[in-house]
Amino acid sequence: MRAKFTLFFLIVLKQMARMLFKVELTRVGEVPEDDPWSKLRIVAILNHTSLYEPIFAGAVPRRFLRRLAEHGVIPVASVTMNRPITGKFFRALAAHVVSISRKRDETWGAVLSKISDPKAMVAMLPEGRMKRANGLDAKGRPMTVRGGVADILKAVPEGRMLIAYSLGLHHVQVPGQTFPKLFQTVRMRLEVVDIATYRSQLDAQGSDFTAALIEDLTRRRDLYCQEGPVPDEQPL
């Protein structure tokens, strides 16, 4: 019953996003020969700038929304989940929405236990916090990729990871701003990588796995989360 309600909610969200915004998705990197939306186990969204990022649902296929509704796992910061309206909204986005403390405690363990299901697909924000208008987080620190994404990648032996590079949403809503600006164009670049191959490439570097992953995702973020042309960009 929950899956049906969640799918209905996601479809309504998709239609509203299409009505109120122009959502553009493009591809970067190698494109799989089969359906790039299949076999996804991890979705990592880089350049977290606004709680309005669910509007990107306006451009994803319905089969992706169904996967979220039936097998999706989304870790969300407890400070967000504890808000009366925002918390209820995020609880409706996936089959399993886990409130986390941003520490490696039992809340993070709950996320890892959910993704042990081979059908699970976790959607996460590897930076762990939101970029403010000055380009820093709420405490004035530079935005960095945190190590939790390495725990996720280690826990998933195969399948695909979708890396989603947001070009930013401050023109829609800056954190702390009450009302969003409607009818804006929002853009995201998508890259699909094979998890087993990606893990092998990181292991082959001969250094700490977590450090290698953070360095690689930071490099990819800085390349693809920018305006202007980037290598290998193609229409979706």
Image (cartoon, rainbow, N blue to C red):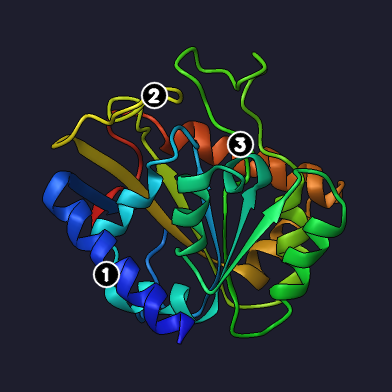
Observer-side mark, 2 or 3, equals: 2
Q: Which residue is mark 1?
A: 11
Quote the CA–CA distance across marks 1 and 2: 25 Å
Query: Eyeballing the image, is 129 above or below 36?
Result: above
Residue at 28 percent across and 34 percent down: it is 229
Mark 1 or mark 2: name the one nearer the start of the chain.
Answer: 1
* Image location (x, y in percent) of residue 195: 62, 69
Mark 3 or mark 1: name the one nearer the start of the chain.
Answer: 1
Q: Which residue is mark 2?
A: 174
In the image, 74 versus 227, the foreground residue is: 74
Q: Residues within 10 Å of mark 1 (few under 14, many from 20)?
A: some
* Image location (x, y in percent) of residue 207: 86, 46
Mark 2 or mark 3: name the one nearer the start of the chain.
Answer: 2
Residue at 49 percent across and 12 percent down: it is 134
Q: Report the amino acid beneath label 3.
A: Thr
Query: Eyeballing the image, is 158 above or below 101?
Result: below
* Image location (x, y in percent) of residue 76: 61, 51
* Image location (x, y in percent) of residue 27: 32, 55
Q: Is residue 37 visible?
A: no
Judge from the rendering whether residue 138 lies leftward or rightward of residue 56; answer left or right.
right
Give the residue furthest to the front.
84
Q: Dot 3: what SS?
A: helix
